[in-house]
Amino acid sequence: MRWIIGLIINALILMGIAYLFAGFYVSGFVAAFIASLLLSIVNAIVRPILVVLTLPITVLTLGLFLFVISAITLMFTAALMGSAFVIDGFGMAIIAAILIAIIQTFVVKPMRKK
């Protein structure tokens, strides 16, 4: 049940970012929910591979390269979604990844501890 609530919160985060930035487009809540589901699947499968492959550069940047990996997973999710979820450029993906990480830190992660 918490997983579904987390997906709904992530969908709302994606919609909020789409509202704030013109370079980030989500066609609606259903598309945001599907993008949130796909993003969680991509984060479970692709992200660990990317983290292992880029471990030296992640250590050199003191973990800041993880935002680049998050941006890559966002771009991959946008590519899977097609025109329902569009990110205009890698810079916008990095900004979105940073915002998602900050919001999840204060909203989603405290909810998991309950």
Image: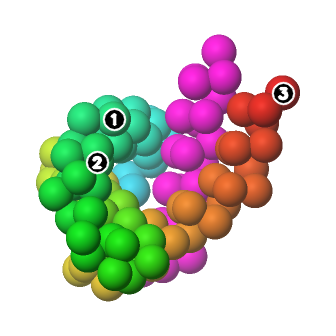
109 shown above or below 20: above
Q: Which residue is mark 3?
A: 114
Asked if residue 32 is positioned above or below residue 61 in the image, the reply reads above
- Circles 1 and 3, Cβ within 8 Å, touching? The answer is no
Q: Residue at x 36, y 73 (%)?
A: 59
Q: Residue at x 28, y 48 (%)?
A: 47
Q: Does residue 22 belong to the magenta stretch?
A: yes
Question: What amino acid does circle 3 point to?
Answer: Lys
Residues shaded magenta: 1-25
CB of mark 3 within 8 Å of CB of mark 2?
A: no
Residue 65 placement (x, y as % from top left): 35, 74
Q: Is 79 situated left or right of 3 in this image?
A: left
- Residue 78, image x and y in percent? 24, 55
- From where the camera sits, is residue 31 visible? no
The secondary structure type at the circle numbered 3 is loop
Separation (CA) of disc 3 from disc 2: 26 Å
57, 70: nearer the viewer: 57
Residue 44: numbered disc = 1
